[in-house]
Image: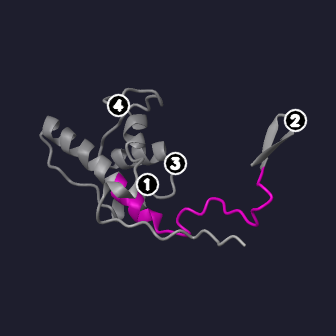
Amino acid sequence: MAVARAGELEVARPARHLSAGLFDLEGVLTDSGVLHAWAWGEVFDEFLLRLTEKAGWHFIPFDRSADYSDYIDGRPRLEGVHAFLGSRGVRLPEGRVDDPAEADTAHVWGAKTLFTTRDHPDLQAEPSAEAPRG
């Protein structure tokens, strides 16, 4: 891929053998919402279980349909963390990107949702939509 400079802006130009480019198709070519909801459920359930054990509260798991739709889907990652936990009466400090993994901050818990489908045997990625080259 070649890079052309326009002042301070760098613009990537695809190599000559490419005939098309696809951008930001998450949720278009695959049902990524199912994968995201699963990941958020894994992360929030871990946090909520630990919190309920400490506080003596009744554990209510993350609802991968309703909670994902109401608080996570379509929001930036940190906003989703705050929205969902706020719905449960929990407030976390924002923290920083470089917080240690054991810190209870929105940055840490939001980052824990980054995963691959191979982490869960019941989830399958859709086949590639790459167009044949010719």
Residue at coordinates 52% horizontally, 48% vertically from top-left? 76
Residue placed under numbered mark 4 in the picture: 101
- Calculate the distance from the C-alpha at mark 1 to the C-alpha at mark 3: 8 Å
Q: Is mark 4 on a helix, strand or loop?
A: loop
- Calculate the distance from the C-alpha at mark 2 to the C-alpha at mark 4: 39 Å
Upstream in the sequence, badge 3 or badge 4? 3
From which residue to which does the magenta span run? 13-39
Q: Which amino acid does label 1 sit on?
A: Ile
Q: Which amino acid does label 3 sit on?
A: Pro
* Residue 63 in sight in this render: yes
Image quarter hosting the C terminus? bottom right
Residue placed under numbered mark 3 in the picture: 76
Q: Do the residues labelled 2 and 3 touch (CB within 8 Å)?
A: no
Upstream in the sequence, badge 1 or badge 2? 2
Q: Which mark is residue 7?
A: 2
Please determine whether, in this image, residue 73 is positioned above or below residue 104: below
Q: What residue type is labelled 2?
A: Gly
Residue at coordinates 40% horizontally, 53% vertically from top-left? 116
Q: Do the residues labelled 1 and 2 touch (CB within 8 Å)?
A: no
Q: Is residue 16 left or right of residue 125?
A: right
Please determine whether, in this image, residue 100 is positioned above or below residue 23: above
Q: Does the magenta stretch include residue 23?
A: yes
Q: Which mark is residue 9?
A: none
